[in-house]
Amino acid sequence: MKKVLNRSLMSWFIAFAFFIGLGYFVVNLVIHSSEWAQKPMNAHLSVTGLAQAGDILDRNGEILASSDENGNRQYHSDYSTRLALLHAVGDDSVNISTALQSVYRTGLTGYNYLLGLGLPQSFRSSSDITTTLDAESCAAAYNAMASREYNGACVIYNYKTGEIICDVSTPTYDPYDPVEIIEGDDTYDGVYLDNAVSSTYPPGSTFKIVTAAAAIETIPGAEDRLLYCDGGKIIGGEYVTCVEPHGEINMKEAMAVSCNIYFAELAVEVGPDVMTQYAEKFGYNKEFKVDANTLAMSRYNVKGASTSSLAWSGVGQYTDMANPFHQMMIAGAIANGGTPVEPYMVENVTSLFDFNKIIPGAHGKSGTRMINSSTANTLGDMMRYTISDHYGDAMFGDLHVAAKTGTAEVADGEDDGWIIGYVTDDDCPLAFAICIEHGGFGIQSAGFVAGEVLPVAANAVR
């Protein structure tokens, strides 16, 4: 009798475990089936799944990707636009994992978690995606970068609404003519990576914005303090260099001429704890998303750093790393009085049934406040002065721009060039970040690209 009871209990336990496991599987099937289906190992969906996929359109209704009557995927008719939008839109493969055609592949194709792709196309609810992107602006950014054979990233968004106007990454290729990556040839190194989403770079002098904010909010009268720069100074036993002697200057002038000595000394005075606190207020060491994509995390870490390393961190060197989209959000926060608006690219989705939850983006959602409004205004005035009185407005056409450039030293000795900033004109609420790999001086490389693309992007929001 006891043996029968034990066997019965064991049978009940096995049955219970089976149904618990079955329930767990069914729940995961419903929640994660579209993710499983779009994995690269699923050759059917990866290779043929776009044959009947929905359209992807820019903000003006221009078709960026569509399927013809023969099941062939078609892309924008303009060559430069196709190359500009490769990383945002994607190609027929799933090599660019952050592209719309990879992230939302199942929704575009009408995949159903119960029937997969088994339904006839006439019954399948494939989705069309309208984006916030402006094809003309993206092409202008690509052409500017291609004209000088620049690699890097250019991102622009409406800092009031969060709409991403431009997302361009190079190197790139024509989706009609995928590149052949040959071992030993570095021409297309990183070609499958959207640098705006998935890369980080040393921020160089653009990080002086963070150092300035930390000093303004913790040291009374910091913005009026005069410090002396003679082209270099021993800080913490090591020599910190500057581009040239600047003499006695205040913070506003130091920002305009990008004086390393001024901001290195401020970082040391503020100290590692407060510097870390303000870096994290600005979003360093934190996770941000653009629609379904998680951005590469910007990093700031001076734990255990020497005094000289802390000094270098204050001018955007040491181990500092920044993501282009994050840098754009910092510029947007300053324009918005200290609070960023979260960026998004997916405006809306047209589908009979949205089984796969292609959820439109943040649509103007405010992020966490980075700095108080008076500090943002002070930083904005400094950035505006940098352009108006130091570089000149002519490079941006009829736009009035507030910006900070950066020239970041990298391991191989070829500096990266940065510019981050925003347009101050009320009818053109654009914030931007551009990083050019091995571009040298930021104003000459990233600044050149900004001068080419911002007037075009302005037309998209005016």
Image: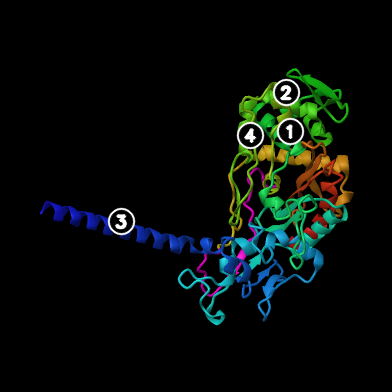
Q: Of callouts 2 and 1, which one flags the residue occurring earlier in the amino acid sequence?
A: 2
Judge whether residue 355 is colored magenta: yes
Distance from Cα at disc 1 to Cα at disc 4: 16 Å
Going from N to C along the chain, the mark reached first, 1 or 4, is 4
Does residue 280 lie above or below 43 as drawn? above
Q: CA distance from mark 2 to mark 1?
A: 11 Å
Q: Nearer the viewer, mark 4 or mark 3?
A: 3
Front of the two marks 2 and 3: 3
Q: Residue placed at 55% from the left, 82% from the top?
A: 122
Q: Look at the numbered discs 2 and 3 and tell me whether their residues touch, using CB distance below 8 Å.
A: no
Disc 4 marks a residue whose amino acid type is Tyr
Rounded to the nearest angstrom, the CA distance separating label 4 from label 3 is 51 Å
Label located before the other in sequence (2 or 3): 3
**The C terminus lies in which quarter of the figure?**
bottom right
Crowding around mark 2 (Cα neighbors within 10 Å: few <14, some 14 to 19, many 20+) is: many
Mark number, residue 278: 4
Q: Are marks 1 and 3 in contact (CB under 8 Å)?
A: no
Residue corresponding to mark 1 = 317
Q: Secondary structure at mark 4?
A: helix
Question: Which residue is found at the position 81% from the left and 67% from the top?
Answer: 79
Report which residue position mark 2 lands on.
308
Mark 1 or 3: the one toward you: 3
Does residue 198 show up magenta in the picture? no
The secondary element bearing badge 2 is classed as: helix
Give the total number of marks visible in the rendering. Answer: 4
Quadrant in the picture for residue 374: top right
Looking at the image, tell me whether mark 1 or mark 3 is earlier in sequence order.
3
Q: Which residues are magenta?
A: 332-358
Examine the rendered structure and indicate whether residue 50 appears above or below residue 457.
below
Main SS category, magenta section: loop
Visible residue check, residue 404: yes
Question: From what the image shows, is residue 114 above or below residue 375?
Answer: below
